[in-house]
Image: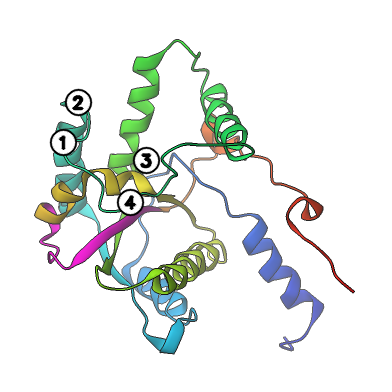
């Protein structure tokens, strides 16, 4: 296929637009060679001065289970016992971000049949983050703590590249900032050096087609709402 062909462009666009946060997976294993290929492809993401500021921990089997069990114990014990290493969200939400956040959250809970007063069910759903939503592969992403915002921007492109490349192989993902809430537990379980910040986790696997939460996809803003065209 020619590199400039319309078919290739459509394939890339389909991979991007079909990506969504999948929160329930089949037990179907993902071959190690395919995981390595996805990471190798994503490693082509651009970064300032080609610094490539990412480091990934890939978890399967007993190591993934051990991390999930440790995180579950800490989560069920109550509020996070230590402060985040960085703030993913603003300390105070304002519009339009507050409305978008609420629409996303209530949309997910609605797909699961969780009512607004069912706090226990909400907590149970959130806890599934730490089991990587049942995915056969979990990943934890870290960055050296002396790196600056530019490298964090580069990191976002690396994460997106993994998620888009995964779609090309029929896989789905869910990027999860929830792991940053319990960075000390993650660090202890994976022996992460102190100099590295826990950025996020990611679930990787084949989506469960019968899971109602996987049918949910939040609306996206039209181009006109976030773009200024100047001639």
Q: Is residue 197 magenta?
A: yes
Provide the residue span drawn in magenta: 189-203
Circle 3 — which element? helix
Residue depth check, mark 2 versus mark 1: number of the one nearer the observer: 1
Task: Name the mark on residue 78.
Answer: 2
Q: Which residue lies under the disc numbered 1?
A: 81
Q: Which residue lies under the disc numbered 4?
A: 136
Q: Which residue lies under the disc numbered 3?
A: 133
- The reply to whether discs 1 and 4 touch (Cβ–Cβ < 8 Å) is no
Work out how far the residue at label 2 is from the one at label 1, CA to CA, in angstroms: 8 Å
Residue 207 placement (x, y as % from top left): 49, 46
Work out how far the residue at label 1 is from the one at label 4, CA to CA, in angstroms: 28 Å
Residue depth check, mark 4 versus mark 3: number of the one nearer the observer: 3
Q: Which residue is nearer to you in this view: 100 or 114?
A: 100
Circle 1 — which element? loop
Work out how far the residue at label 4 is from the one at label 2, CA to CA, in angstroms: 27 Å
Work out how far the residue at label 3 is from the one at label 1, CA to CA, in angstroms: 23 Å
Work out how far the residue at label 4 is from the one at label 3, CA to CA, in angstroms: 9 Å
Residue depth check, mark 3 versus mark 1: number of the one nearer the observer: 1
């Amino acid at each position: 296929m020619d590199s400039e062909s319309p078919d290739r462009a459509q394939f890339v666009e389909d991979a991007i637009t079909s990506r969504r946060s999948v929160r329930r997976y089949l037990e179907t294993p993902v071959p190690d060679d395919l995981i390595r290929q996805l990471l190798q492809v994503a490693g082509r993401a651009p970064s300032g001065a080609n610094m490539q500021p990412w480091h990934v921990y890939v978890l399967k089997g007993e190591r993934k289970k051990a991390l999930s069990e440790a995180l579950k114990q800490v989560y069920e014990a109550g509020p996070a016992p230590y402060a985040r290493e960085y703030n993913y969200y603003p300390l105070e939400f304002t519009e339009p971000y507050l409305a978008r956040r609420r629409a996303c959250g209530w949309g997910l809970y609605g797909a699961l049949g969780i009512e607004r007063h069912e706090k226990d069910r909400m907590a149970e759903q959130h806890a599934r983050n730490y089991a990587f939503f049942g995915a056969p592969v979990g990943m934890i992403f870290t960055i050296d703590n002396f790196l600056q915002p530019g490298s964090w921007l580069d990191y976002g492109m690396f994460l997106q590249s993994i998620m888009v490349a995964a779609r090309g192989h029929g896989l789905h993902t869910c990027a999860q900032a929830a792991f940053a809430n319990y960075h000390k537990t993650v660090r202890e379980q994976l022996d992460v050096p102190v100099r590295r910040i826990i950025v996020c986790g990611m679930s990787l696997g084949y989506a469960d087609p019968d899971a109602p939460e996987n049918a949910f996809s939040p609306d996206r803003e039209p181009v006109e709402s976030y773009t200024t065209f100047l001639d």
